[in-house]
Image (tube, rainbow, N blue to C red):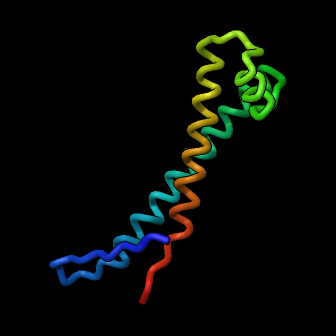
């Protein structure tokens, strides 16, 4: 578990500002996740192959490399990072 203490010299309450910033970041992450999932779905439809199966084939050198397949891998990696960030932010709790 990580802990963070924020200190501000301003009289304005810091907690609502941080909460709003985190909520906004979560909204942006959700939008990014939706876009990335849509793009993955387009690849899956075009190649008639799930992303999981594609990754396995790619890792086993069963596919010829091309720019589009590299994009597919990039989208999968992006989705993984976005999901990890979302999970991290969802777990943030405020004391008091």
Report the number of discs.
0
Q: Give the camera-side residue of 48 and 2.
A: 2
Q: Give the camera-side residue of 31 and 63.
A: 63
The correct choice, above or below, for 80 with respect to 42 in the image is below
Name the residue furthest bottom. 96
Spot occupied by residue 71 in the image (x, y as percentages of width and height)? 59, 23
The correct choice, above or below, for 3 with respect to 33 in the image is below
Name the residue furthest front. 60
Q: Residue at x 61, y 42 (%)?
A: 79
Spot occupied by residue 56 in the image (x, y as percentages of width and height)? 76, 28
Q: Residue at x 74, y 14 (%)?
A: 63
Q: Quadrant of residue 43?
A: top right
- Judge left or right: residue 33 versus residue 19: right
- Judge left or right: residue 16 versus residue 68: left
Spot occupied by residue 39 in the image (x, y as percentages of width and height)? 65, 32
The correct choice, above or below, for 62 with respect to 72 in the image is above
Spot occupied by residue 33 in the image (x, y as percentages of width and height)? 60, 46
């Amino acid at each position: 578990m990580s802990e963070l203490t924020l200190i501000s010299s301003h009289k304005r309450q810091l907690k609502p500002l941080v909460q709003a910033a985190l909520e906004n970041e979560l909204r942006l992450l959700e939008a990014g996740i939706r876009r990335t999932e849509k793009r993955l779905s387009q690849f899956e439809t075009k190649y008639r192959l799930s992303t999981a199966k594609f990754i396995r084939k790619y890792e086993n050198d069963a596919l010829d490399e091309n720019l589009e397949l590299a994009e597919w891998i990039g989208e999968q990696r992006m989705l993984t990072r976005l999901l990890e960030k979302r999970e991290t932010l969802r777990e943030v709790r405020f004391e008091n």
